[in-house]
Each structure stands twice: as C-alpha cells, then as structure tokens.
Amino acid sequence: MDARRAVVFVHGNPETDAVWSPLIAELGRGDVVCLSPPGFGAPFPPGFGCTVREYRDWLIGQLERFDGPVDLVGHDWGGGHVVNVAMARPDLLHSWATDAIGVFDPAYAWHNLAQGWQTPGTGEESVGRLLGGTTEQRAAYLVGRGIAEPVASRLADGQDEAMGRAILALYRSAAQPVMADLGRELPAAARRPGLCLARHGGRQRGLRGDAPSRRRARGCPCGRARRAGSLVDGARSGTRGAGAPGVLGVPGRCGGQLTDVPPLAVMNRTNDDTREKIAMSSIELEPEAIAAAAAAIPDGQPFVMLNLLRYREQADYGEHADGPPCSGREAYHGRYVPAFGQIAPEGIQLFWYGGVLAGLVGPSDERWDEVALVRYPSYADFRRVVENPRYLVEADPHRRAALADLRLIAIAEAS
C-alpha cells in the first residue's frame, strides 16, 4: 500500500468497523478508510435486500467515489465482498487482500453454523442466541474469546436486530451453488495484485465424524484457499501455483505484509509444530461444534457428557482477574462449578467424578488430571446452559482460566 493511495478496509460478520482498531494502530497511519457493510454497523439503503450480489454492488458504489484505484482489504464476509469486486471491477483497485478466497472454491461447503442460518426457523433461533442478551453480556463473551475489552464493547454495541436480519439474508443468498458460480470469474481478479490470507492448521471445527470427511477437511481452509487462489494466480502468470507461502503471525507482522503486497500469496499462520500443539490442546466450545452435535443427538435423547480435564498450574484470567490468585483446579471447583450449578436447569446431574491415575493407551504427552460424567436429560438442556448469557458471563470465564486442555464427548447407552 502507498501513502498516496486510499487504503480501504471492509469488515465481516458479526462485526462493526471497531474490529480493525488494533490493526490500524499497528499500521501507524491515520488515513485508512473503514467501510461498514449495510446492517453491520451502517444503515440499510432503501430497498437493500442484503444479498451477496447487492453487497458487491454496494461496495462498487462506495469505491467509485474515490479519486482513483484503492488498496482494498477485506476480513471474513468483507473479504468475500472484496473478491467479488476484484472479479467484477478490477479497474477500481490498485491491489486487494482477502482472508475469504476459499469460499469461491467449487468444492466449498458452508460450515455448520452458516448452514443453520440458511435454514428457516433454525437460523432465526441461532441468530437470536448469537445476538441476544445485554450489550455487557455480549461484550463479556467476546472478551472471553480473546478480543480486547474496548473493541469487544464497541462490537457488542453494534450487534443489533438489523445485523441479525442482514446475517440471515446474506447467508441465505450465498447458499451453494451461488458462491461456486461467482467463483467462475476468479481469473478476472488477476488483473490486479492480490494477497490471500489463509488460516493454516489448528482444529477443524464443526466437522462430520466420518473418516472421509475428516480426510477432506485436512486440506481446509487453506486447501480451499490454495485451490481458489491458484485460479487467480494461474490466470495471471500461466502457472497453477498458489504463490509463495509465508508466515502471518502477530498483528504487527500482518500490518507489515499489507504494506508490501506481492502479486498473489497464500499466507500460512502456523508451522507444522505449532499446528500440532494447537490441535492437541483446546478448551474452545465452538458454535459450529454445538450445532453439529445437535444434528447427531436425537431430540429428547438423554445422554452423558464425558469431561476430560487438565488444569493449569495457575488460573489464567489475563487482564480480567477480579479475585485472588489461585490454581486452575481451585478456579474450576471453587468458581466454575458453583456458577454452573446456579445456571443449570433441574435434571442435570454429576454422577461420577474422579482423578486420573495413569494413562495406558494414547499419545505419550497427553495428560489428564480428572474425569467427570454429567447426565443431561436432553441436548437441548445442555445448550440452554452453554448458550445462556449468564453462563457466558458468570461461569465460562472461570472455565477458560482454569483449564489447559479439555475434551467433551457426548455418549449414550448402546442399544
């Protein structure tokens, strides 16, 4: 990017332009223009239907107001809008960058949460849970997911009913084969230099459990990004390569990459060693995984949740500690478990709990401290707890602070 050219950022879902604040600070320039898509921090134009093509045309209209070609950067759905503009109106761009090139791959399948949003009834219920509660509760949830408090508060303040309507309309307009059809024009994006950022490695979320699906998933999302990126790069240079792989890590390095955009690159966030560590240690309970389990567990089916727990030596509350220091075990049993009990409906029962003596089969570096078996009357009861705004504010921060690793496995008596 060049100080003489306009630099334009477009954010995604469920966000406002506040999400860019840390990166803009890293870039150290005050001339960045942040465009908020309608419904995501900006009002709807008259008659705006929130479809993927309407968002493309909205962004084209915004860019036509600039004096010349811009450096355009998009995140999440903003990245999708950027690619759509690069395909349709490359004359408006000096360069472009996206972290969403993979959605244009012909084999792309929407994640489970998106498929829920694309389903009438299910989508309305899901979006209601996502954007429900008070602003303070939504902000606390975002902080728990690693977003700095000032940014989280601004994001939560913009998560309103209009955003919910925009989410549903946008995702429903983008159900396959729409994105695959749009992706047929990817070679046109090669007329301008492009940077494709792809998260490489870590856990794959919301995946089906069968072996073929897991094998297909190992190449995603970076595999999809490489395949889609190769269509752009191949058209530009006559090769099928996805460009030189690089490393994208802390925000400062991200800002550095954006100031010197190569013709096309797929940026990998982690190396193999880091990916293995991420895959082996996880405490996140992702919305996609919650939705995927709902499809596998019959309505009204009682089940038992197997909890494998490994504690931190010291509970880690980051900058949000509001009590005396304690061990991970103390935070879990003295803070998380009581808060969970206050929120859980009747019928949820801890019926076995114990310490781990030794592991006989499994990875040599896998270690568990305790095991708990919790009986739930139905999966709906489980969701009523973990999606409750009170849980996200009063209980979940203690769980995150206490645990170094976790497995949750839903089991039922064999028939």
Image (cartoon, rainbow, N blue to C red):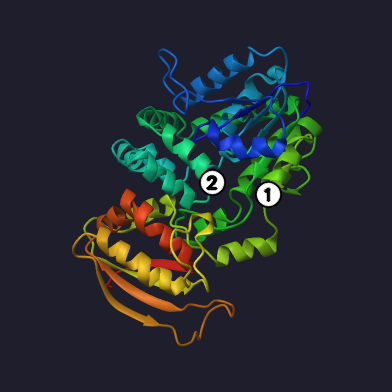
Residue 71 location, x and y as percent?
71, 26
Q: Is residue 269 placed above or below 47 in the rendered structure?
A: below
Residue type marked 1? Val
Residue 95 location, x and y as percent?
73, 27
Q: Looking at the image, tell me whether mark 2 or mark 1 is earlier in sequence order.
A: 2
Residue 332 location, x and y as percent?
40, 69
Q: Residue furthest left?
A: 346
Q: Residue at x 34, y 57 (%)?
A: 296
> What's the CA distance linking mark 2 and mark 1?
14 Å
Q: Nearer the viewer, residue 347 or 333?
A: 333
Q: Residues within 10 Å of mark 1 (few under 14, many from 20)?
A: few
Whether residue 324 can be seen here: yes
Which numbered tag is attached to residue 122?
none
Q: Quadrant of residue 252?
A: top right
SS of the residue at dot 1?
Answer: loop
Q: Residue at x 55, y 76 (%)?
A: 366
Q: Which residue is mark 2?
A: 148
Q: Which residue is mark 1?
A: 250
Q: Is residue 408 placed above or below 217 in the rendered structure?
A: below
